[in-house]
Amino acid sequence: MKTILWAALSANGNYARSSQRHPPKPEATADFAAHAREHGNFIVGRQTFLEFQENASRRPQSASMDGIDIVVVSSTLALPPGAPAQTAPDARAALALLRGRGHQTALVVGGERTHNAFLSAGLVDEVIVVVTPSFEDEGRKITLSRGERREATLIEHTSLGGGLIRLRYALGSVDTW
């Protein structure tokens, strides 16, 4: 199964944070929604899922998520019957769930722990980074396991408007220093 990691990062490489005062850029949420619709699914961590549920500004305004398979990576979250998502205890189980539903591509959208879990398990084939026009203090980052290195090949770069740039990379195999 092809796995694509999607992340919005500040210009200095940290995860782009949002708040009531600094909501996510609409171009970024629209890009996320377009990729979710294209692949028909997305995988998200528990904390990010709960933030999506609680904070309307974090959700894409441009499109409905109806018909999109949502998998929340969590071993503790109990979703009620009829919830808009399913849970999986880890990265491999999340991919197996989507594979079982007929998907050939999985979109991993966050947060930091979820992204890094997929990367450290060697499960990511492509990375899409939406670079936002902001610099932020020391923050969360996309990382590999200590001593690992992966080459990336630029597939595409696109201006999304509003000062945002989307970079899409294919990841090579894991190497060590």
Image (cartoon, rainbow, N blue to C red):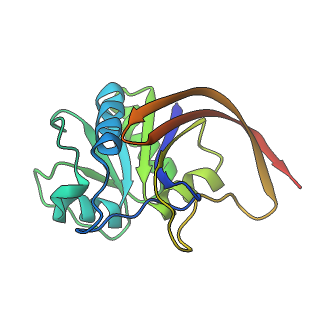
Q: Residue at x 22, y 68 (%)?
A: 20
Relative to 144, residue 164 above or below? above
* Rendered location of residue 102, percent (x, y): 36, 26
Comparing 72 with 10, the one in front is 10
Along the horizontal axis of the image, is 13 left or right of 112?
A: right
Q: Residue at x 38, y 28 (%)?
A: 103
Along the horizontal axis of the image, is 80 left or right of 25?
A: left
* Rendered location of residue 101, percent (x, y): 33, 31
Outermost residue, bottom side: 138
Comparing 3 with 143, the one in front is 143
* Rendered location of residue 84, percent (x, y): 17, 48
Along the horizontal axis of the image, is 80 left or right of 114?
A: left
Outermost residue, right side: 177
Comparing 134 with 76, the one in front is 134
On-image quarter of the C terminus: bottom right
Q: Residue at x 23, y 49 (%)?
A: 85
* Rendered location of residue 89, percent (x, y): 42, 60
Q: Residue at x 50, y 64 (%)?
A: 113
Comparing 77 with 44, the one in front is 44
Question: Where on the picture, by quarter, is residue 47?
Answer: bottom left
**Badge count:** 0
Relative to 126, residue 145 above or below? below
